[in-house]
Image (spheres, rainbow, N blue to C red):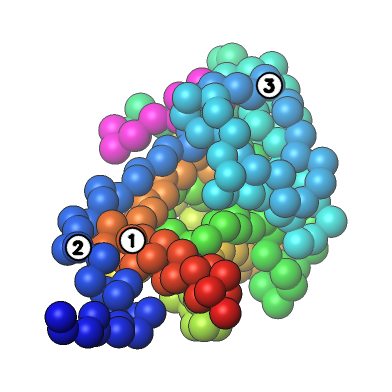
Amino acid sequence: MFPSPRLSPLALAAAICLPGTVMAATVTSFGFDSGYADNAVFASDGIFLKDSSGATSDVVSLSTPGTNTMSVEQVGSADTGNGFLYDSGGTPAKYDVASPLETASSLGSHFLRTTTGLTGSFVTSAAVFRFDFAGGVAAVSGELWDIDGNTSQGSEAWRVVVILSGGGTVEALSPVGTNNKDTTSLDGQSWRFSFARAGNEIEALDFHFVGSKTTGIGAAFDNLTITQVPLPTGALLLGGALIGLVGLRRRLA
């Protein structure tokens, strides 16, 4: 009778680990249209967002590194002191309503916004708001709305900074708004950004105001979409096999 070969835990785990297929990526959208009421304020940092079905996510949380807060605003609501004003010359004035030129997407029924108008210079300060992604994501996209300026107050522009695992960054700059009567300044329209990486390397998004305005500054945000890439099934089996073997060796010792 031949002696039974002795396999190392790693070799045995590899034998147990059959080739597996890569699971499909998980895509989740956050439109603020389900599960939120008008003027729902994010009063503290690190609160997880609700996805488009109204379920609370365990991945995306919101924080405001500065002193401002964020809230959910109803489109076209009567809260005329907040959000953004489109077509100020119209009667009645259109608050928090998309421009007729906006065809790429829609605000839906609610969107995220700064609670009040921001003041001061934000060029060198902390981000106005931030999304953190627990475990990282492979891709993220979203929309900033109503980026316009005023010729007497200065310009509006936003820089979106992606924080990567390992400390690297990637960024994108919005169009610069200089006049809210100029259609090229995105008055009542959206600017869409999108980032993608090979794995779940995106840890956070920072939103910095980089325009020249020092008063009447605000942000409207909507249609956040994230993509997570799960581990291959083979890697999951390998991890489970290794853990089981460690426990077996301890019992036999």
Q: Which residue shows up at 35% across the image and 84% down it?
A: 8
Which residue does the numbered mark 3 point to in the structure image?
A: 38
SS state under label 3:
loop
Front-lying residue, 243 or 181: 243
x%, y% of residue 32? 55, 30
Q: Which of marks 2 and 3 is nearer the N terminus?
A: 2
Q: Earlier in the sequence, mark 3 or mark 1?
A: 3
x%, y% of residue 86? 53, 32
Q: In this view, does 164 lie to the left or right of 209?
A: left
**Quarter of the image containing the C terminus?**
bottom right
Q: Which residue shows up at 25% across the image and 48% down it?
A: 24
Q: In this view, does 246 lie to the left or right of 11?
A: right
User: Mark 3 is on which residue type?
Assistant: Asp
User: Mark 1 is on which residue type?
Assistant: Leu
Q: Which of marks 2 and 1 is nearer the N terminus?
A: 2
Span highlighted in magenta in the image: 102-110
User: Mark 2 is on which residue type?
Assistant: Leu
Main SS of residues in magenta:
loop
Residue density around tag 1, few if under 14, some if 14–19, many if 20 or more, within 10 Å? some
SS state under label 1:
helix
Q: Which residue shows up at 33% across the image and 61% down it?
A: 237
- Answer whether labels 2 and 1 touch (C-beta < 8 Å): yes
Q: Distance between the residues labelled 2 and 3?
A: 51 Å
Which residue does the numbered mark 2 point to in the structure image?
A: 18
x%, y% of residue 61? 63, 49
Front-lying residue, 94 or 202: 202
